[in-house]
Image: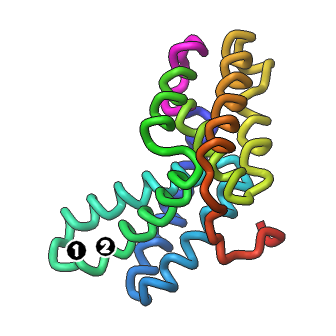
Amino acid sequence: MARYAERGEAFSRSDGGYLVTLTSHPLAYVIQQIKWLGVLLASRGMPRWLLESHLDLLYDELSAAIPKRRVKYRKLLKAAERLREARYDWIPQPDFETLAAAFAANSGGGLANAGEMLVSAVCDEFCGIAKAVPSLVVWLGDPARFSAQWCAALDQTLDCARTVATRNGRYPANLEVSMGAA
């Protein structure tokens, strides 16, 4: 995705390296730090679904490269599971996939995983990250960058995702971080 090209590469190198160093710590600390990082990133336009996906991929790659440390690297999977569970509290995976696919179909396409990021940002918003949607939409919904069809599909997807989250939400996720710091 164009927005994340340079920033995404920098994230992969710096934060990805940081995430690997966390595996030397107890699981509770790993989860706390990843929750904090997730809030920070989501508040800056990078939904936690991206971090969740990054953790899954990082585990796979590290385990393949250094199989004897697989147990240690499972902490990354556990943290990804926590992020996923928080997302599922608001929008279950089948609904998540349906909403993301509807955006892809209605927007005219153009950017891979944009629907997933939109729906994830709504989940983040419902988890208490107030800036999650606005910080993503300032770029992803910019009419100077995207067509009217795209922007209309974006608005419709956000509305539908918020409706699903309102209907399905069982309880807020425990973020264990200071929202003001993000």
Q: Is residue 62 above or below residue 124?
A: below
Picture quarter containing residue 34?
bottom right
Please report the bounds of the magenta region as a residue range: 104-114
Residue drawn at (74%, 57%), measured in percent from left and top? 129
Residue drawn at (69%, 47%), measured in percent from left and top? 45
Which quarter shows the C terminus?
bottom right
Viewer-proximal residue, 90 or 136? Answer: 90
Instruction: Report the amino acid beneath label 2.
Output: Arg
* Label 2 – label 1 distance at C-alpha: 6 Å
Picture quarter containing residue 146?
top right
Q: Residue furthest right?
A: 180
Q: Is residue 78 magenta?
A: no
Which quarter shows the N terminus?
top right
From the viewer's perspective, tell me whether residue 49 is left or right of residue 122.
left
Residue drawn at (43%, 37%), measured in percent from left and top? 94
Q: Is residue 130 above or below residue 67?
A: above
Around disc 2, counting alpha carbons within 10 Å, would you say few (fewer than 14), some (14 to 19), or many (20 or more)?
A: some
x, y percent for residue 27: 42, 83
x, y percent for residue 121: 65, 45
Q: In terms of secondary structure, where does tag 2 sit?
A: helix
Viewer-proximal residue, 133 or 12? Answer: 133
The colour scheme applied to this rendered structure is rainbow
Identify residue for label 2. 74
Given contact means CB atoms under 8 Å apart, are the residues at marks 2 and 1 in contact?
yes
From the viewer's perspective, tell me whether residue 77 is left or right of residue 113.
left
Picture quarter containing residue 166?
top right
Identify residue for label 1. 70
